[in-house]
Amino acid sequence: MDDNIKKLQEIIDNSSNIVFFGGAGVSTESGIPDFRSVDGLYHMKYDYPPETILSHTFFMRKPEEFYRFYHDKMLCLDAKPNEAHRKLAKLEQAGKLKAVITQNIDGLHQQGGSRRVLELHGSVHRNYCMKCGAFYDAHYMKAAEGVPRCEKCGGIIKPDVVLYEEGLDQQTLSDSVSFISQADVMIIGGTSLAVYPAAGLIDYFQGGHLVVINKSATPRDKYADLLIQGSIGEVLGAVSVE
């Protein structure tokens, strides 16, 4: 591991155009369960599979069931940024990291200090009335009982989160492609790269160094210039930023 950290440090030291692409593994160290690990959400037992509950069709047909799951398992508002979030923010402040592209919806990158965060799958912190478009924050959603309703018109409030069967925001995708295609270093961390179209964005990277940091194997491991199998928080925590 020490040799890998040294290699990572050297890559970071020699770059001023880094892009970070991350997933659920970045937030598990903050206590937020991921979806596909052995103890992740997909292995818990509910009346319906999480993949079904978190679909557009299910949300429209059974909003009560959707919000029971969403309230209990997706609104982790007590979670705090970990070392990975904080170190990425420092890299951005140092002028090295140009963007964080995340599949997470928890807002921890912003809480950790990152400014340019592209949220591919949306955020629990943005919620809008489906009828009049009024905005509500995550704390309003957490406090609501049953299906959250708009105080202005009584419409159902929907999280600004990309559900199954829904498309990704085109502007976010376009911006992500732009940052990735221009980067000279891309660090992939805490993601199995199993969710598309998000994982397909890696194809746009044409830079010099591809770094993969993850506890388990990913489809991109064989293409990585540096592969570190371990905790993203521990690895980035060991990197110094000048």
Image: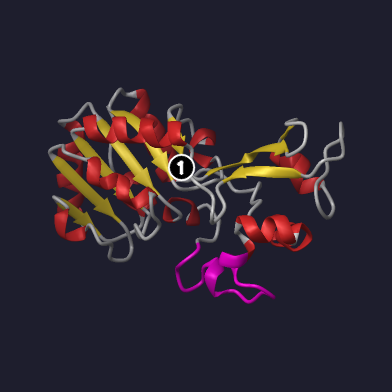
| Amino acid type of the residue tagged 1 in the rendering | Leu
Q: Is residue 125 magenta?
A: no
Quadrant where the N terminus sits is bottom left
Residue 73 visible:
no
Tell me the crowding category of disc 1: few under 14, some 14 to 19, or many 20 or more residues within 10 angstroms, Cα based: many
The x, y position of residue 14, in whole percent, is 15, 31
Of residues 77 and 43, which is closer to you in this image? Answer: 43
User: Which residues make up the magenta segment?
Assistant: 35-52
What is the quadrant of residue 60 in the picture? bottom right
| Residue 17 sits above or below residue 83 on the image | above
Q: Residue at x 24, y 41 (%)?
A: 204
Q: Which residue is mark 1?
A: 120
Quadrant location of the C terminus? top left
Is 229 on the left or on the right of 149, as rendered? Answer: left
Q: Is residue 1 above or below residue 156?
A: below
Magenta part, dominant SS: loop
- Tell me residue 19's x, y (percent): 30, 36
Q: Is residue 41 above or below residue 161?
A: below
Q: Position of residue 229 (x, y in %)?
A: 27, 61
145 and 66: which is toward the camera: 66
- Residue under the image location 35 percent in, 28 percent down: 92
The kind of secondary structure element at disc 1 is loop
Q: Is residue 49 magenta?
A: yes
Q: Residue 166: in sight, yes or no?
A: yes
Q: Residue at x 42, y 51 (%)?
A: 23
